[in-house]
């Protein structure tokens, strides 16, 4: 039977802070009861990942992002056509759009947790800034998984927008 919540962490462990999504999955696997949660990890999103969304109630995509003024962004996603010439680097929105095309219905409620990183070079380790931002993201995930319901996640996403979590610089 398909678990109602899917958390998809993606990123390349060999490229510094790009590993933030998979590291978040490791945290969840160690600290939460996974009876109703499936964890999925990959280097990048692929068109086939639209199949993983079937029969879900909630989906959380967790990824790293380029440096910014906030330690993470958390918001609800809507399907969006991929305008690129390749499916090599799909967005979560384009995966949702493929789901809609395949199933002829709206995808499950889906959210993106985009954790800011600093270094993405091949062979780099996790930066101190990324480590700090991951701690903030873990705090958010604690809140999300305490009540994995659509209305709760939407409320949390709305609350997070005006009160951006600022990065604390050294």
Image (cartoon, rainbow, N blue to C red):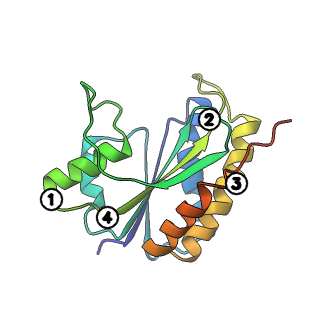
For the residue carrying disc 4, how many other residues have a C-alpha within 10 Å: few (<14), some (14-19), or many (20+)?
many
For the residue carrying disc 1, how many other residues have a C-alpha within 10 Å: few (<14), some (14-19), or many (20+)?
few
Which residue position is annotated with label 4? 108
**In the depicted view, which residue is nearer to us: 115 or 152?**
152
Q: Earlier in the sequence, mark 2 or mark 3?
A: 2
Gap in angstroms between the C-alphas marked 2 and 4: 28 Å
The kind of secondary structure element at disc 3 is helix
Which residue position is annotated with label 3? 136
- Residue 5, image x, y percentages: 41, 68
Q: Is residue 135 above or below residue 118?
A: below
Gap in angstroms between the C-alphas marked 4 and 1: 11 Å
Q: Earlier in the sequence, mark 2 or mark 1?
A: 2
* Callout in the foreground (2, 4): 4
**Label 4 close to label 1 by CB (< 8 Å):** no
Tell me, for residue 60, which label it has, or none. Answer: none
- Residue 21, image x, y percentages: 54, 47
For this orientation, the residue located farthest to the front is 162
Q: Earlier in the sequence, mark 4 or mark 1?
A: 1
Which residue position is annotated with label 2? 17
**Label 3 close to label 1 by CB (< 8 Å):** no
Examine the image and state in which quarter residue 110 appears.
bottom left
The kind of secondary structure element at disc 2 is helix
Which residue position is annotated with label 1? 103
């Amino acid at each position: 039977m398909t678990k109602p919540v899917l958390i998809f962490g993606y990123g390349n462990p060999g490229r510094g802070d790009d590993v933030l999504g998979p590291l978040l999955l490791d945290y969840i696997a160690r600290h939460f009861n996974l009876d109703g949660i499936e964890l999925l990890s990959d280097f990048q999103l692929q068109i086939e990942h639209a199949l993983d969304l079937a029969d879900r109630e909630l989906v959380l995509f967790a990824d790293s992002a380029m440096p910014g003024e906030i330690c993470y962004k958390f918001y609800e996603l809507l399907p969006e056509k991929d305008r690129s010439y390749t499916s090599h680097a799909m967005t979560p929105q384009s995966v949702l759009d493929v789901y809609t095309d395949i199933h002829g219905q709206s995808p499950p409620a889906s959210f993106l947790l985009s954790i800011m990183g600093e270094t993405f070079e091949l062979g780099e380790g996790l930066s101190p800034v990324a480590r700090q931002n991951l701690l903030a993201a873990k705090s958010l995930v604690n809140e999300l998984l305490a009540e994995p319901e659509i209305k709760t996640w939407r409320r949390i996403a709305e609350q997070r927008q005006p009160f951006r979590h600022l990065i604390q610089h050294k």
